[in-house]
Amino acid sequence: MVFDAKTVSMLVKETWRTLYMVGLSSLISYLIGIPLGVALVVTDKDGIRPVPLFNKVAGVIVNLLRSVPFIILLAMVMPLTRAIVGKTIGANAAVVPLVIAAFPYISRMVEASLKEIDAGVIEAAKSMGASTWQIIFKVLLPESKPSLLVGAAISITTILGYSAMAGCVGAGGLGDVAIRYGYHRYQADMMLVTVVILVIIAQLIQEIFTRSSRRSDKRIR
């Protein structure tokens, strides 16, 4: 296949569409996932404000959503996607299943990061009279920042993979290009190009967040 101006323009357009889907769904997923992850830690039986019933119910919901394969989730949430966006194809429509698939994963990543914090640090804050909110915003989140950034690299890369899969159902983006040209039209070179672009994007995400994590880690200064 000859990569003429039209083909290059299409690849650029679909790359931006992929970045849009990943960026918007990552933002919304983190707006849901961080508070949920914090709540799972705080309300745990060994947390600073135990609420066993909430913790168990939230944990079950998160685990259930994480257990559904993304390709099945895409089909399951189509009625919800249509109700929210008004259609089931396109980049905006893909954001709905991407968020539903990603925020439970992110909440568990956040939970794991917060649980890495030394219990002695939390106990010291409690002994000084710190409130629950003060412990969350001045101890838990700041102390876990390096781990949260590493988790973000993993989570956003996972969302990137989901976005490519969403191309199978009309979401557009690089996944759609790979399916339409690489699979249906047997254009292996187009498939290879889309894979290379996705790998480059994934590596850039990994590098940005890994560097940010190192800069924020007080232990290596």
Image: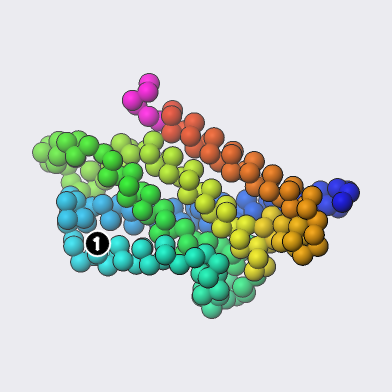
Q: In this rendering, is residue 9 above or below 170?
A: above
Q: Please name the residue shown 22% across and 56% down the image.
A: 43
Where does the image place residue 192, in percent across and percent down from the top left?
A: 73, 48
Q: Is residue 145 left or right of residue 184?
A: left
The stretch drawn in magenta includes residue 140: no
Where does the image place residue 54, in percent across and percent down from the top left?
A: 24, 65
**Residue at which label 1 appears:** 55
Q: Please name the residue shown 48% across and 34% down the image.
A: 210
Q: Is residue 146 left or right of residue 38?
A: right
Q: Which residues are magenta?
A: 216-221
Going by the numbered disc 1, the residue's amino acid type is: Asn
Q: Tell me how many marks there are.
A: 1
Where disc 1 sits, the SS reads helix
Q: Is residue 153 left or right of residue 58?
A: right
Q: Please name the residue shown 64% across and 41% down the image.
A: 200
Where does the image place residue 211, in percent across and percent down from the top left?
A: 49, 31
Question: Where is the C terminus found, in terms of image quarters?
Answer: top left
Where does the image place residue 22, in percent across and percent down from the top left?
A: 57, 53
Can residue 26 be seen in the rendering of this structure? yes
